[in-house]
Amino acid sequence: MAVASVGSRSCGLQMAMACSISSPKSRTRGSASIPMPPLNPRDPFLSKLASAAAASPDPLLKPSTNSDTPPYLDLFENPKLMATPAQVERAVTYNEHRPRKPPPDLPSLLLHGRIVYIGMPLVPAVTELVIAELLYLQWMDPNQPIYLYINSTGTTRDDGETVGMESEGFAIYDAMMQLKNEIQTVAVGAAIGQACLLLAAGKKGRRFMMPHAKAMIQQPRVPSSGLMPASDVLIRANEVIKNRDTLVKLLSRHTGNSIETVAKVMRRPFYMDSTKAQQFGVIDKILWRGQEKIMAEAASPEEWDKRAGIKVVDGM
């Protein structure tokens, strides 16, 4: 009797499982429906979201190569969606869609957008990373442009203290010249010394500068000699002079100024704001929306004096 009851019970379980698999409608009827928040069809945000999704069906956000500005600077004027509204899931609980693995680091995300950011002085560790990223981006696609963002004091700090050898800047410069890709440079913050050379070495017509950034060129500095013999100090001084002449020639080539002009302004630290850097030939365009129109409509100093009733005396 016990054996028969066990067999009949197992047969009943198998039949129940078969019935539940063969009839999914009965299973859905019994299960509780997930509560969904109400949607307002007249919501202007949803209509704008749907129109933007229809205009840009590409699921990936790719930087525009034909725009007059570097990538991601015009993102909010020309939005592109990562997914259409139909592909977005609504989270019922807070932990339902949390990532199961750590997100990628920020330099990796910038590298995915073909952006190389120099935000430190040019020391060996920075030079190694920048050159490796440039070579990697060329290997990924030798036809797409590379965007080099610069905020660096070069091989010296702003107060003149040497933090790296001049060869660090020349190494990045030579790597830029050897790449097949078009390199577009953007100055954010500061581009001093060797960093200013990297800014000027970008593709002609595609060298940019933020409106409140600054650039500065100066002569290389002799590293601290300490207790070195006099002959060794002389050798180092001669090497610094050679690096200075090389820097003058390269800046003259990329800015369009004569070697004598560059050498003259480099006798002392030569600071440039965005407008002065554009006039000197370091950059081609200032990334200030509407800045060209504002400067064109601004009155000249003589016009301001005339409107204010100021008379200029000859010889003053």
Image (cartoon, helix red, strand yellow):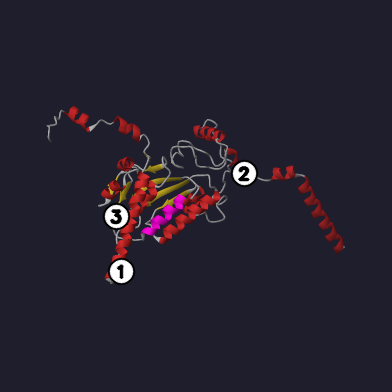
Q: Earlier in the sequence, mark 2 or mark 1?
A: 2
Please state which of residues 306 and 10 is positioned toward the viewer in this rendering.
Answer: 306
In this view, the mark in front (2 or 1): 1
Per the rendered image, the range of residues in magenta is: 166-177
For residue 74, what is the image quadrant? top left
Residue placed under numbered mark 1 in the picture: 232
Q: Which mark is residue 34?
A: 2
Judge whether residue 196 can be spotted in this image: no
Of callouts 1 and 3, the N-terminal one: 3
Foreground residue, 125 or 247?
Answer: 247
Residue 155 spot, x, y in % from top left: 35, 57
* Residue 185 visible in rendering: yes
> Which mark, by number, is residue 219?
3
N-terminal of the pair, mark 2 or mark 3, is 2
Viewer-nearest of discs 1 and 3: 1
Measured as percent of width and height from the top left, residue 172 is found at: 42, 54
The answer to the question of whether label 2 and label 3 lie on touching residues, with beta carbons closer than 8 A, is no
Q: Mark 2: give few (<14), some (14-19) or many (20+) Cα within 10 Å.
A: few
**In-image side of 101 versus 127 (left or right):** right
Whole-angstrom CA distance, mark 2 to mark 3, is 69 Å
Kindly state the secondary structure of the residue where label 3 is placed. Answer: loop
What's the CA distance linking mark 2 and mark 1? 79 Å
Helix, strand, or loop for circle 2?
loop
Residue at figure coordinates x 86%, y 63% from the top left: 3
> Mark 2–mark 1 contact, CB under 8 Å?
no
For residue 311, side relative to residue 219 (left or right): left
